[in-house]
Amino acid sequence: MLSEIVFYVNDKKTVFNGNPLTRLIDVLREDLGLTGVKEGCGEGECGACSVIKDGKLVTSCIIPVGAVNGSHIYTIEGIRDTEKGKCIIDAFAEGGAVQCGFCIPGMVMAAYALLSSNPHPTEMDIRKGISGNICRCTGYDLIVESIKLAAEKGGSIWA
Amino acid sequence: MGMTYIPSTLSEALRLRAEKGAKPLAGGTDLMVQSKRGIALAPQFPFDVMIITAIDELKGIRALDDGSVEIGALVTPSEIAASDIVPWHVRQAAAGMGAIALRNTATIGGNIGNASPKGDLPQPLILLDAEVVLASVKGERRMLLDDFILGSKKTALGDDEIIRSVIIPPHDFTYSFYRKIGMRRANAISKLSLSAAAVVKDGEILDFRASSGASGPRVIRSKDAESIIKGHMVEEIPELMDSFLEAWNNAISPHAMPEYRRNTTRRMLGYFLSSIHEGASPGIISEEV
Amino acid sequence: MPQTAIDDRIVRVDATSKARGEAKYVSDLSFPDMQYAYMVRSSIPRGKIDSISIPELPEGYWFISADDIPEEGKNELWMIQKDWRCFAEGDVKYVGETIGLLVGSDRNVLRYLLDNVDIKYTEEEPAITIDEGLAVKGGPIVGEDNVLCQLFVEKGRPMEEVFREADSVFEETIETGFQEHVHLETNGAIVTIENGKYTFYASAQCPFYIRKAVAGLLGLQAEDIVVKQTTTGGAFGGKEHFPDVLCGPLLVAEHKIRKPIKLIFDREEDMLYSVKRHPAKITYKTALDKDGNILGIDGVVVYNCGPYLSGSFVVLQRGVFHANGVYDIPNTHVKGIGIATNTFPSDAFRGFGAPQTLFAIETHMEHIAKRFGFDPAEYKSRYFIKQGGETITNGHIVERVVLPEMMKQVTDASDYFRKASEYRPGSGKGIGISFYNHGGAFTGNGEQAIIKAHARLVKTGDRVRIEVGSTEMGQGFQTTLRKIAAATLGISIDDVDYDNPDTSIVPDSGPTAASRSTMIVGRLVERCAEEMKERWQEGDFSVEKEYEHPEGHPWDQNTFRGDAYLGYGWGCCIVEVEVDKLTKEVKVTGIWSSHDIGKAIDELIVHGQVNGGIVQSLGYASMEKMENRNGHFRQSSMSDYVIPTSMEFPTQQWFLVDNPYEWGPFGAKGMGELVFNGADAAYIDAVERAIGKEIHKIPMPPEDIEEVLNAE
């Protein structure tokens, strides 16, 4: 039985001793100050709080911290200065993907997860890959274009 | 407010279940949402819960010797959708659940145990006569999923039991149909879903089955209606159609949004049967455009 | 650093910090000793408050209500009028009306307290729908007849005369529903005291509105309050007046508690307890000759306002002023009524009243065309208003109207005429078209008489700082405005600063609303920059300008006659669909649009606005259903009130026409709302053709399409 939850956030070991039902998003935002993780809906519907857990995209607002023992979690703060993270962020900026920006860190995480598993996505692959990330501003076209751009510009980094 | 436990093995979990009545929490996609209390607040449950995500015995998809497929309770929709041994109807339903992040988090055990009428996986599983394996400190038992889910949010799960796995018996359908209608094209809760399948050999319909999701408190499967078609010849379909559709219509619960759900179900089943009658090539009967 | 030219493709100034997760939204801010606030709200739509019982409050916890407003203050939020109460007192008028604020340091404790507040009511019969409001169900909410505001406009000859000459009269009622903004960032604000002044950090479109709205609660002047806008995660009108409803109670709490207090809505609160787009019921009665020519239109436009006025009268005016769409109808009479009900007050939402009437007139025109066997595009184009044409308010269209060119662009690109004739009604395939416009900036002489916007440029060395009250909320204004300044000054955009406004520093440039920012504030900055450029060698100095009204735009705000707007943006949209025969689900297979926005200051930003506005409009027409039962909204989350995902619609084809506007910066007009105003009607037109039936309302999810198909 676990009494202490140990996991890794952006490669840093984190030990959590509180209520295991605490939402992962609250540990990230409130305890660790990772405010790039946004709360848009609190029920896993909008994707603004998306993080990567053990290589997979998840919404941190519905995951209890008790479920991440031993896991490696990456947030926007953990990828933004990596080669892949920069590639996506630059493409988003250049391609006009960002408007109000609230959905964007989560969208970048979704793009990161997509390109990491599918370096040459079709338009439909991209649309599917971000279909859990709701954006109210852009109508998505320029986000889709920007992810295409990241795939092209990144080239071998995604392979 | 209950206690929260994090067992690491199945036996630990079964003991907690027996001694504390702790309810299993896996992906959290249902429970964490139902009990949410707002920003920066942990959900609260009026009972003990145990977070079971670490239990390896509940993971994995395997083919059994008799051709069945066993899916561990913690298997996610993403894993199901990507598996080449899981039957087509179930993969379709798994692939259409929520969006990627949810499919990476939700579990088949949770989707069944939550017994929401709008749950995506029970519908095709019930079509396929899938069974649930229920484990307790006393041992295991198996029952048909159709018998396990009693109604909206109600199951036959014992106070000391947890869902261990789902076993899907083998089928070799000549024709298959699956359709989910959500509130939008992706990332949507089901408004209505339908699976149908038939085995046709030498013009005879050896097996015919259908199941409707989100059409009532539980998945609808009507053996009576199925028997109207089953055992008959393909050329008889036109004369059986009306009585079959009528029988199906009567099986659908008379609640909420009846017209649209009824008519759409009727059109889909009619289309499936007509396609068989018109000699469609064996395989997936895809949607009409 | 190279000079920035207006047509340069540049990277949005806020893109990278937002994408990196570094931009701080209000929920990301915290202050030492910060307290949290939860709203205590009414749970019934109408009734008397008999008692409010609060659980025993631990040390350091407060319940703030109307009782805490000091003697010198008044329990009112000054929006346009002062009817919206900061706290309900004695009675409640809608579900979710603020009754009090629970404040303290631990959200777990606050949540427990909130769950244990017990309010007893004597319930009264509410009026929820437009019809119930008009019928004064349960007795009047406002005045004697629930009419919160009304107006009429007329053009041409008297209606009786016109209708006497008609060969036929076609009358129909078209209805539109509530729409929720669903800005991804929910509403939120923090109040604190800085340098002895009450200071707000708020997610808001209009920091100066907040100051004005809340100051009176403590008997203060607007200048006594400081508002600092935080990075705003979408607004769409939902953060125009509504932040006042958060900031008012916070100010009263701050007066007592004097510690930083943070109030952030969760999504459920934002869905259930925030303003929505006004539902509308619009009846057109049209006099026609035997060939289907329109002799005149008699219209009644009714908007469901909720119990308080907020921006409703202005919304209604804009609705009425757009009730003839882009058409020169020879004789018109349109009456507008804002009806009071016991729903959450309706307020601003992108388009501000115009989308409802534009949807109605487009659908009505298209129904007339089809009844007389004309192609809707061809029929509608006969009535396009032209330069010099008389508007519904007896004003005139000043600019060149390039709708015919725009129509040609989109009909060619979409192969509209071939498809329109090939797709048989009811075949499951359809293509639809709509035309629309949007009056830029405040109605009539409002910019001159009410707003009197100011803008300032401050030069320090080789850097220039823009000081305006206008806000970035996602629409790209920080980039647009810097680009205007840089291109006018002949410097690099990187040498221009423009921070989120702080009301203690910047002049009031008016609200960030009404598609006025680029057109009005952009022009002010352009004028400041022109002068600064001439005086560039003078060293460090600043230039401030006040709005100047262009000559020749007569307007009478009492009779609503004259030039309602200084200029219009124009649009044309085509949508192509397939309706699934089995499920009645609609698949959009093509979207084409053309817009005249004068001149695009930044084409990439405009591209994003066009895409986003059209998708929002398609959501409004198709899936965004917000129902109200007995005063309670039924949709409370993003899973039951669904908005479009990336999978809903195909990549859009879009065009712009250059048609420079004399008084806009570099020829630009407003565009943020225009692009919302028409895709809904094109979509419904397409669906109608695909199913071979007329539709009279939105939204139209599959079950409603089924209902239309089974009707009669």
Image: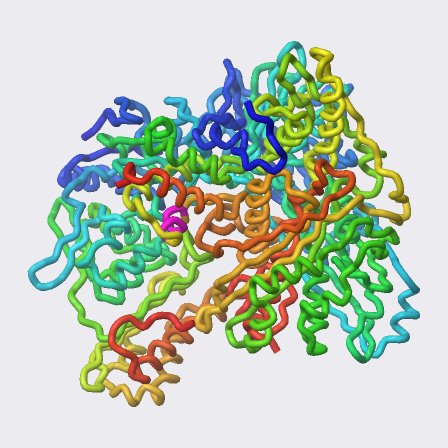
Residue C84, position in %: x, y? 73, 36
Residue C128 is covered by the magenta coloring:
no
Residue at 24 percent of width and 24 percent of height:
A4
Residue B234 lies in quadrant: bottom left
Residue at 36 percent of width and 52 percent of height:
A122
Q: Is residue C90 placed above or below C545 in the rendered structure? A: below
Foreground pick, B226 / B137: B226
- Residue furthest to the left in view is B65
- On the rendered structure, is C520 left or right of B205? right
Span shown in magenta: A125-130
Residue C595, position in %: x, y? 65, 51
Q: How is the image coloured?
A: rainbow
Count the labels in the image.
0
Residue B254, position in %: x, y? 45, 69
Foreground pick, C468 / C708: C468
Residue at 62 percent of width and 33 percent of height:
C5
Foreground pick, B140 / C686: C686
Residue A139, position in %: x, y? 52, 48
Q: Is residue C350 placed above or below B210 in the rendered structure? A: above
Residue at 59 percent of width and 21 percent of height:
C495
